Image (cartoon, rainbow, N blue to C red):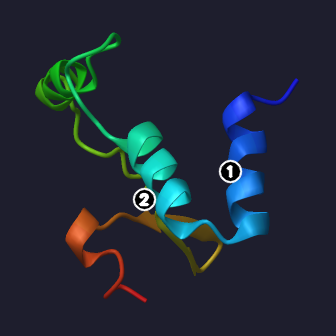
Amino acid sequence: MKRASTYVSQVYKATADYHSGRKLYEHYSAVTDADPPHFLSLRSIVLKRKQPRKLFVQCNTALKGASTENSTHKTQQSVSAW
């Protein structure tokens, strides 16, 4: 089931009613703290709990005679190791 706003936006597009379409878009895309779920308050909570991005760095494997050797690099050096 589609929302009524989808139908209304299609009417605005089909009739080229720029001002009404813009008003509708701004109404639904506004980020306010007035109505639930209070996006601005939630945003501050999310930013307080933000964790650093997890990085997966794969080690390089080199063949040394009959054995293999794993060499690891620090995160900043992983690109320059190649």
Name the quadrant containing residue 72.
bottom left
* Relative side of 7 to 44, left or right: right
Name the quadrant containing residue 16.
bottom right
Q: Residue furthest right?
A: 1
Q: Earlier in the sequence, mark 1 or mark 2?
A: 1
How many other residues sit within 10 Å of disc 2, few (<14), some (14-19) or many (≥20)? few
Q: Give the vertical position of 53 relative to 43 (above or below).
A: below
Q: Give the vertical position of 37 relative to 63 (above or below).
A: above
Q: Give the vertical position of 31 relative to 56 (above or below).
A: above
> What x and y, as percent, mark residue 29?
41, 44
> Which residue is under mark 1?
9
| Label of residue 41 in the image | none
Tag 2: amino acid: Val
- Label 1 to label 2, Cα distance in Å? 46 Å
Q: Of 47 and 13, which appears nearest the observer? A: 13
Q: Secondary structure at mark 2?
A: loop
Q: Of 14 and 54, which appears nearest the observer? A: 14
Question: In the image, what residue occupies the spot 18% across and 23% down?
Answer: 49
Q: Secondary structure at mark 1?
A: helix
> Which residue is under mark 2?
57
Q: Residue furthest top?
A: 36
Tag 1: amino acid: Ser
Q: Nearer the viewer, mark 1 or mark 2?
A: 1
Classify the position of the C terminus by image quarter.
Answer: bottom left
Q: Of 82 and 53, which appears nearest the observer? A: 53
> What x and y, as percent, mark residue 5?
67, 36
Q: Of 4 and 40, which appears nearest the observer? A: 4
* Relative side of 32 to 69, left or right: left
